[in-house]
Image (cartoon, rainbow, N blue to C red):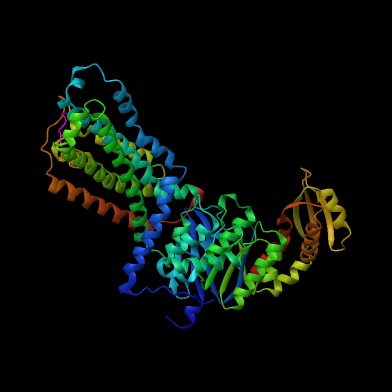
């Protein structure tokens, strides 16, 4: 094994079929340290690729190695790899702290080591105060964060994160992205899937574009960024006073459109500058006039961007 | 990020690591087995034989056989073989052991184990041991409580003599031992069934039928069952009726190692299966 391959994630001609259904096909990737985003519409093969990288799925053909370790050697692989899946489920009856600690003990850490690592992981995701509550009572954003904490608690060299920003409010989203950047700066591999190009733009060093199970483009983030700026992003804000929120956002010059949700408990906002929109939301939350339940980018309008990128990727 | 804590994984220390991991898995699973939402059914099942015995304790049936203390050994043997062993322990083990992996698949939480640096054999061992301890504690308690509940309310002083100075304690320990062996054997079988079958109820019912019809089978086929070896160990042989094909009971020195050997083979098969297993929650 060459010295360089022990610092790379290598997928060599990897294919996965579920019977006759294609998962991913002939994927060749070499991933260096830093943040690499897997981008593509739902069903593109992002989660399949991540599950293959972590041995939850076995490739129909091809080889995968992470830092020189094959994926069929879990006892070695998961000392260096942490994976935060998209499965929003937990072993029943555990508190946040018990959840992290129990699986550190399963890793083989001693009780003292597990205690230290648990506290450190909880602190990183800002969940120390809620650590004694049952995970089942957590909000969606907290569940997302506790899964992130579990994935990074054993201090892996490779972090694989499937849609890790889903369900997070804007402030926590920004903190989490900052945490990713910090981990990447420390030399980790972070592989992050997202169908939200805006998020990818904010944090990635490299991007891998997937569509229908094929890698259609890969490379540096700048190319994607240029294309994104031409397309406004649509965000759904669930709140108690959507009309009042609409009045606020109409004043912003980066907001292209604001439309009430059919159930009148939400507002669709199209903006050319999502960062500024999130900052505005933070201000509104701080003022306390509007109670915001959730904020989620809506990906429908991104299909045009994908289409462009996918086509240009295919042509190149 | 460099790991602040390194786990030593040299050959010499691998056993210590595996034992720690088995302990951690065991504790997590034991908590689920005893306090999870699925445990309610097991408690009900374990208590079930005690209900009729509690009623009998209050109202002694009028039949002559109930008036003679010497008949109680046979009454318990029939009650134990028919209800506790063949039904309560059988279905109890089915529920506990099939859910060790199948339950995690249904709850979509098995991947947490698969994403830990744990040998699959270690995972199988930790889970199996948790199921074993759960079933042994519950059903041995049932076995003992049922026996005491049958004897003491009707013939207190005779029962005291029987258990302290007669064969009572031997019988009690033997039945408890049979229950423990049943948990070993059925447990391993149901663990593997839970891994191979998406709907494990059907193979469980097939085995149930096979075990019940064991008395009709020729001697050679009788040996391909768990109940044959367990019945061979019973302190009081029970007649299986006029249509039963009589076969020599297997001596304890063959029956016990055979059951344990088959258990180990089945666990090896489970480990092999789990090494090749993929996580497909969508299909569960």
Q: Residue at x 49, y 66 (%)?
A: A115
Q: Is residue A254 magenta?
A: no
Q: Is residue A72 visible?
A: no
Towards the viewer: B226 or B221: B226
Towards the viewer: A304 or B179: B179
In the picture, measured across the screen, residue B101 lies left or right of residue B178, that is right
User: Which span is picked out in magenta?
Assistant: B234-239
Measured as percent of width and height from the top left, residue B110 is found at 46, 54
Using the rendered view, name the quadrant where residue B276 is placed.
bottom left
In the picture, measured across the screen, residue A20 lies left or right of residue B129, that is right
Using the rendered view, name the quadrant where residue B46 is placed.
top left
Using the rendered view, name the quadrant where residue A199 is placed.
bottom right
In the picture, measured across the screen, residue A241 lies left or right of residue B224, that is right
Query: Residue pushed farthest front?
Result: B157
Measured as percent of width and height from the top left, residue B99 is found at 40, 46
Say if B218 sits above or below A178 in the image.
above
Measured as percent of width and height from the top left, residue B284 is found at 48, 46
Measured as percent of width and height from the top left, residue A132 is found at 56, 56
Q: Is residue B238 magenta?
A: yes
On the rendered image, what quadrant is the C terminus of chain A found in? bottom right
Query: Residue pushed farthest left?
Result: B248
On the rendered image, what quadrant is the N terminus of chain A found in? bottom left
Q: Residue at x 15, y 37 (%)?
A: B235
Q: Is residue B12 visible?
A: yes
């Amino acid at each position: 094994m060459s010295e360089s391959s022990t610092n790379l994630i290598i997928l060599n001609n990897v294919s996965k079929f579920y019977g006759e259904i294609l998962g991913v096909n002939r994927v060749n990737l070499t991933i260096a340290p830093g943040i690499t985003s897997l981008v593509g519409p739902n069903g593109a093969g992002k989660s399949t690729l991540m599950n293959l990288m972590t041995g939850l799925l076995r490739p129909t053909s091809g080889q995968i190695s992470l830092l020189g370790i094959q994926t069929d050697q879990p006892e070695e692989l998961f000392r260096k790899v942490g994976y935060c899946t998209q499965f929003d489920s937990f072993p029943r009856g555990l508190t946040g702290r018990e959840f992290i600690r129990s699986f550190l003990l399963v890793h083989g850490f001693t009780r003292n080591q597990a205690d230290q690592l648990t506290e450190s992981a909880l602190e990183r995701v800002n969940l120390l105060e809620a650590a004694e509550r049952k995970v089942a009572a957590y909000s969606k954003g907290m569940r997302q964060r506790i899964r992130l904490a579990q994935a990074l608690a054993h201090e892996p060299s490779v972090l694989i994160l499937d849609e890790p920003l889903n369900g997070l409010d804007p402030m926590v989203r920004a903190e989490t992205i900052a945490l990713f950047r910090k981990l990447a700066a420390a030399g980790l591999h972070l592989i992050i899937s997202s169908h939200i190009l805006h998020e990818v733009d904010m944090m990635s060093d490299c991007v891998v574009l997937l569509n229908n199970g094929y890698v259609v483009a890969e490379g540096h983030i700048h190319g994607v960024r240029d294309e994104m700026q031409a397309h406004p992003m649509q965000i759904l804000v669930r709140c108690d006073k959507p009309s009042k929120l609409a009045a606020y956002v109409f004043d912003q010059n980066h907001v292209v459109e604001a439309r009430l949700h059919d159930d009148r408990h939400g507002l669709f906002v199209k903006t050319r500058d999502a960062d500024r929109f999130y900052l505005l939301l933070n201000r509104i939350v701080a003022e306390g006039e509007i109670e915001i339940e959730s904020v989620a980018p809506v990906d429908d309008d991104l299909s045009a961007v994908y289409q462009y990128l996918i086509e240009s990727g295919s042509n190149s | 990020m460099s790991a602040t804590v390194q786990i030593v994984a040299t050959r010499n220390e691998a056993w210590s690591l595996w034992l720690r991991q088995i302990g951690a898995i065991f504790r997590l699973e034991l908590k689920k087995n005893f306090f999870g939402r699925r445990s309610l059914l097991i408690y009900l099942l374990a208590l079930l034989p005690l209900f009729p015995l509690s009623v009998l304790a209050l109202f002694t049936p009028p039949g002559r056989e109930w008036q003679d203390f010497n008949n109680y050994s046979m009454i318990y043997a029939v009650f134990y073989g028919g209800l506790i062993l063949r039904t309560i322990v059988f279905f109890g083990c089915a529920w506990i052991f099939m859910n060790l992996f199948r339950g995690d698949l249904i709850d979509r939480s098995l991947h947490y184990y698969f994403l830990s640096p744990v040998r699959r054999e270690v995972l199988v061992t930790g889970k199996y041991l948790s199921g074993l301890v759960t079933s042994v504690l519950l059903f041995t308690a049932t076995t003992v409580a049922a026996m005491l509940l049958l004897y003491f309310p009707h013939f207190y002083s005779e029962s005291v003599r029987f258990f302290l100075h007669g064969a009572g304690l031997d019988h009690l320990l033997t039945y408890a031992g049979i229950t423990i062996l049943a948990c070993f054997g059925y447990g391993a079988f149901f663990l593997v069934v839970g891994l191979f079958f998406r709907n494990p109820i059907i193979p469980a019912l097939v085995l149930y039928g096979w075990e019940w019809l064991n008395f009709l089978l020729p001697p050679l086929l009788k040996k391909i069952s768990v109940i044959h070896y367990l019945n061979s160990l019973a302190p009081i042989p029970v007649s299986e009726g006029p249509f039963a094909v009589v076969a020599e009971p297997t001596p304890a020195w063959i029956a016990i190692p055979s059951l344990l050997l088959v258990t180990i083979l089945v666990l090896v098969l489970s480990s092999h299966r789990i090494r090749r297993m993929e996580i497909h929650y969508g299909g569960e």
